[in-house]
Image (cartoon, grey):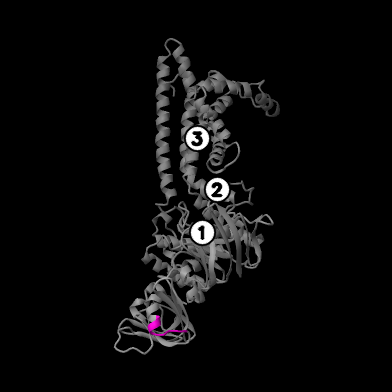
Amino acid sequence: MSLEVSLTHRFPGFTLEAAFRAPTGVTALFGRSGSGKTTIANAVAGLLRPTEGRIALDGTVLLDTGARRHVPPHRRRIGYVFQDARLFPHLSVRKNLLYGRWFARRHTGRGISKSDGGSTGRADLPRIAALLDIEPLLERAPGTLSGGERQRVALGRALLSRPRMLVMDEPLAALDEARKAEILPYLERLRDEAAIPILYVSHSLAEVARLATTLVVMEAGRVAKAGPLVELLADPEAVPALGIRDAGSILTGRVIAHHADGLSEIEVAAGRLLLPRVAAAPGGRLRIRIAAQDIILSRTPPEGLSALNMLPVRVTALRPGAGPGAMVQLDAGGDSLLARITKRSAERLALAPGTGCYAIAKAVSVAPMDIGQS
Amino acid sequence: MDLLPPEARDAILLSLQVALWATILSLPPGILAAYALARWRFPGRQLLNGLVHLPLILPPVVTGYLLLLAFGTRGPLGSILEAQFGIVLAFRWTGAALAAAIMAFPLMVRAIRLSIEAVDPKLEEAAATLGASQPWVFVTVTLPLVLPGILAGAILAFAKAIGEFGATITFVSNIPGETQTIPSAIYALLQVPGGEGAAGVLVLVSIAIAMTALLLSEAVSRRVAARVAGHQPAPAAGRVRAPAAGRGPAPAAGRRPAP
């Protein structure tokens, strides 16, 4: 299952020119607002006709301007979750959820794909409602829901239309931090359970780091970088495109134990970490994002330090920045870590590829937002 | 009713009949014209807009005379209607209904168009991504959301149709029992000595009909608007009304690019 996109779209004073491939899993389209992310999402869903281009999903051509082919949005079976939910105000939550059901049934019959026929709609409703915890909302009217609830219903509505792919355009951007934290676990569950590609548009690297498997970085209408998320986040060369302050790499780990003092012990490739209590049960897999600027490097194991986490690492690359800083890429037992230090420190410690040292991180510097299910 | 002179009673019943038919028959073209003006970009859009609004601006007598020219028994449309379908409009109550419908049309289209323009096209896009073709989007999303506007437009048109005078009297004259509506009857009664009493009754009836229509439209549209805005739980839970037939021809809508 994969989506191939290659398109050019001219706006007055702005040209979008992008090509990328989105494999199964979550492909994040990341970039500043105005970089063309939503245009791509709309072109994929068929809501916008690009000037030129070709879009194919699993080999089914959805758009080919060369061949004058443009499958209209209602025949594409691409579920779209909008930033502003767009629930139908005149229908109850249940009717909103079931809206796409009837069309989906028709289209599986003689639509683009027959591979995923079978029962649709009503049978799926309890399952999806349970997945998103929206059973208590079914008889409510959309106007009475909170922003987070609305977005969950919108997600359920898109899923129940039996899409061959999901497009999510900044689904969390209109929500406050608490509501974001409420929805992210559902999106993680969806990522792990849905066997369809998901195109996730966002300008928040934290969100992207939690959810994505593939990252496409957009800059002024162009693809600046693209590749597997974990690799790209640990690549010092990609840092300028992602934003220096947001730079940080991802470690995957497993919960070993929860301690009585409120800390959780997590095993990663290079050792063990102590972090503020995580929600996952012992044995649960985690994805932990550690900001590059929160890592301290030391050539010798430090003593008398308050920081709880210390991993033995080896320098794999060093990239001096334009200012006083430098990005150091580290190998931590096979995982990649990124540390942001000053050039002066790098010289003082004589860091060079191959140098062994210790990466130190405070337990409290890792925000709950940066710890997700893997 | 027995208090009324028979001409007055006939005029009231005829007016209601004429206005009702005028309203019902102009609803489908009214909704179509309003939708086209609100959502489609096509050559001739301004021309359509002008044509729809023309009866509002022209002297009613001119409209009535043009109807007579076109739909008179020897007019180009009137002769075809009579020869093909046996329908005669001139000097008949059906002609009064046509005149009333045309005079009320601009008001109806305006009200419906405003409410269509108030529907967020983003909701229609969302429906399309859920698999609904354009005709189905219209039936399941746009139409329910513009229902308050349609009702308001219909009631406005009804009230206007009840009161139509100039075009009606020019096109179908003032024949008691056939084309004499309330306004024509009042006019006729005021032309003869001693007619003031019956005219006064008709005036009161006109006021009563107008007030009832207004209050009704307020009440209905408030209820519909509340339901459409989604602040009250929708009634009867359960199944979504499944659209029933095959996909119709999709009208070509103007798509605006989203940056």
Q: Residues within 10 Å of mark 2 (few under 14, many from 20)?
A: few
Q: Where's residue B121, x and y in %?
A: 51, 49
Amino acid at circle 1: Thr
Secondary element at image label 1: helix
Vertical position of residue A22 compared to residue A351: above or below: above
In this rendering, does residue B92 appear at all?
Answer: yes
Q: Where's residue B28, x and y in %?
A: 56, 38
Amino acid at circle 2: Val
Labels in figure, total: 3
On the image, numbered disc 3 is attached to which residue?
B108
In this rendering, does residue B177 appear at all?
Answer: no
Amino acid at circle 3: Met
Secondary element at image label 2: helix
Determine the chain carrying the residue at label 1: A
On the image, numbered disc 1 is attached to which residue?
A38
Kindly check if marks 3 and 1 are in contact, taking CB atoms under 8 A apart as contact. no
Mark 2 to mark 1 CA distance (whole Å): 28 Å
Q: Which label sits on residue B139? A: 2
Q: Is residue B226 magenta?
A: no
Mark 2 to mark 3 CA distance (whole Å): 19 Å
Quadrant of the rendered image containing residue B194: top left
Q: Where's residue B131, x and y in %?
A: 58, 57
Vertical position of residue A208 compared to residue A150: above or below: below
Q: Is residue A349 magenta?
A: yes
